[in-house]
Each structure stands twice: as structure tokens, then as C-alpha cells.
Image (spheres, rainbow, N blue to C red):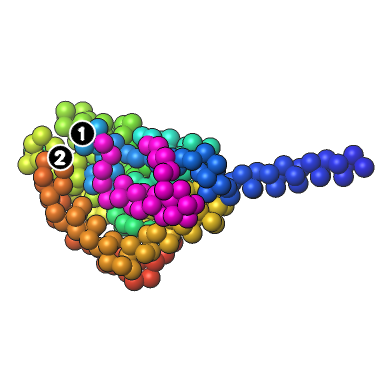
Amino acid sequence: MKLSALMTAVLLAAAATAAQAADTLAKIAESGKITLAYRESSVPFSYLDGGKPIGFSVELSNAVVDAVKKKLNKPNLEVALLPVTSANRIPLIQNGTVDLECGSTTNNTARGKDVAFAVNHFYTGTRLLVKKAAHIRNYADLSKKQVASTTGTTNALVMRKYNVEKNLDMDIVLAKDHADAFLLVETDRAVAFAMDDILLFGLIANAKNPGDFEVVGDSLQVEPYGCMLPKDDPAFKKVVDDTIIDLMKSGRFEKMYDKWFMQPIPPRGTALGLPMSPQLRDNIKAPSDKPAT
């Protein structure tokens, strides 16, 4: 009898937890508020301009908000914005502080154990930002040198693995965010910053002296970006997925891409000039949330 009562309690607790995990839309409806995460220096996806978050991924978030307002019939839904870093973005989704994070987060199987990902909206790979004067062309040139990356990123893991495999004896220094890692290179405290190539191009475009820097090296690993949301929440995931797929099918997604990756962007009016990758074009034709391994 005691065992039966205990099992009943366990099952009820598990059911309550599952219900809570799958209740993002209900939570938003009850509170009258949706909380979006943004990054402060993930150019051109999510970054600050005059203290306001802007970027390609910010526009994706805004489109989801419009869909949620319509779904819940709450046109006056409050939108709360919360800055996150590579280190805290996943915990803040897990504990319910943040409802949606559209930034520059890699969708992979390891993270898929803790959070869910929407349809992939970008593909990128780890490369190196360096000063042109350093004459660094590839990873072998980093042997026994100090190299920066960002805490909580797949890039840091990729670099650590590569460092061991190739016996390069790099001193890998982890910064709080991308802007801090860039500063290490800018001030000669690191010879390179290993990160997703698109983010590196964005940082160079907004640098004080963009002509001093370049992106070099082979892509170590091509991975997709996806918006993060709570795990085991099919109703909310459907709203997010449907929103992004609608953007892709309507042609609005490509117009957004052109705006942020091909045309001049704030704050310096510099164009990244990065055409859409074959992987992303394929994903527009057949939308998928397939993670990197």
C-alpha cells in the first residue's frame, strides 16, 4: 500500500512537471506577457544599436510575437526583452525565465536534450578572426599562441578538440561574450578569435578600424542556427515553426536575409555582402529542424 501511494505521488509529480513544461502558450496567456531573449553583439542576428536590440533574428522573434498575439487573441500582449549570453541562454529557457531565444544559437543534439529548436534559419562554421598584420592563415599558425573564443559556445568545444587532436598547444581563453573576445584580439591579448564566421564578419563590419582585420582558416564544422524554446512543448513549437516556414514560403525570409546580410546595416552602414548558402536555400525548399551531431 505504501509503495502504491509512493508510486502514485511520483506519477502525479511527473505529470505535473510534463504539463508545466508543455504550457508556454498557457503561461503567456495567463501572464499577458511573452519574454524574448536577445544578444548584445551577435551581428547581424541580434545586437544593440542605440540600446535597442535589432537584427535578422530579432525580426524572426517579432514575427513569432505577432503569431502568438493572433493565436491567443491578445493584441496588447506585453513583450519583455532580456539580454542573454552564450553561458546563460539555455538555463534561462529551461527554468522558464525566457520563452523564446532567437539569436545565434547552434542547433545540435547535445543541446536538444535540454531545449527544443525551431526550423533552422542559418548555417555557419567555425573560422578565425585575426589582425591582418599577424599574418595568420590557418589553424597551424596558432601553435603555442593565445586564442580567444566565447564561453558556452560549440566553437569553444570544437577548438579544444582540434587543439588536442593536432597537438597545437594553444592557450584558449574564453570571453563572456563575442564583443569581449573581439576586444582580446583588438588589444593584442589574443592572436585570433575562433567563432562562427558570420559573427566574425559582423564584428569586423562594426569595428573602429575594419580594415585591420580579416577572417581566415577553413570551416571546421558547418552547423545550423535555430530559435530556442522550451523542450516538450509541441503547441508552442508549432507556432514558432509555422511562423518561420510561412516567412520562407512567402518570400519574406529572403527579403529579410537580403536586408541583413547583403545591404548596409547599422550602426556603421557597412554591408556584410554574404550570399545565402546552399544549405540554407535547401532548408527553405524543405524546412527542417535537423540538428548538427
Query: What residue did someone put label 2 on?
Result: 267
Q: Is residue 53 magenta?
A: yes
Q: Split into 4 quadrants, where in the image is the N terminus?
A: top right
Quadrant (top left, top right, bottom left, bottom right) of the C terminus? bottom left
Do the numbered discs 1 and 2 sit on residues whose CB atoms are within 8 Å? Answer: yes
**Amino acid residing under circle 2:** Pro
Residue 95 at x, y = what percent?
53, 37
Determine the residue positioned at 72% across, 42% down. 13
Q: Is residue 19 above or below residue 145?
A: below
Seen at 35% across and 53% down, the residue is 63
- What is the x, y in percent for residue 111? 47, 48
Judging depth in this view, the residue of 142 and 152 nearest the camera is 152
The stretch in magenta equals 52-81
Tell me the element at label 2: loop
Q: Residues within 10 Å of mark 2 (few under 14, many from 20)?
A: few
What residue occupies the far bottom of the structure in this picture?
Answer: 285
Q: Residue at x 27, y 50 (%)?
A: 56
**Horizontal placement of 55 versus 97: left or right?**
left
Determine which residue is flagged by label 1. 50
Q: Nearer the viewer, residue 2 or 49?
A: 49
Q: Position of residue 107 (x, y in %)?
A: 41, 53
- Residue 169 falls in image quadrant: top left
Query: Which image quadrant for residue 172?
Result: top left
Mark 1 or mark 2, earlier in chain: 1
Depicted 116 relative to depicted 46: above or below: below
Which is more toward the observer, 152 or 229?
Answer: 229
Q: Secondary structure at mark 1?
A: loop
Which residue is located at x 49 percent, y 59 percent?
A: 238
Q: Is residue 157 visible?
A: no
30 with respect to 178 (left or right): right
- 3D distance between C-alphas at marks 1 and 2: 8 Å
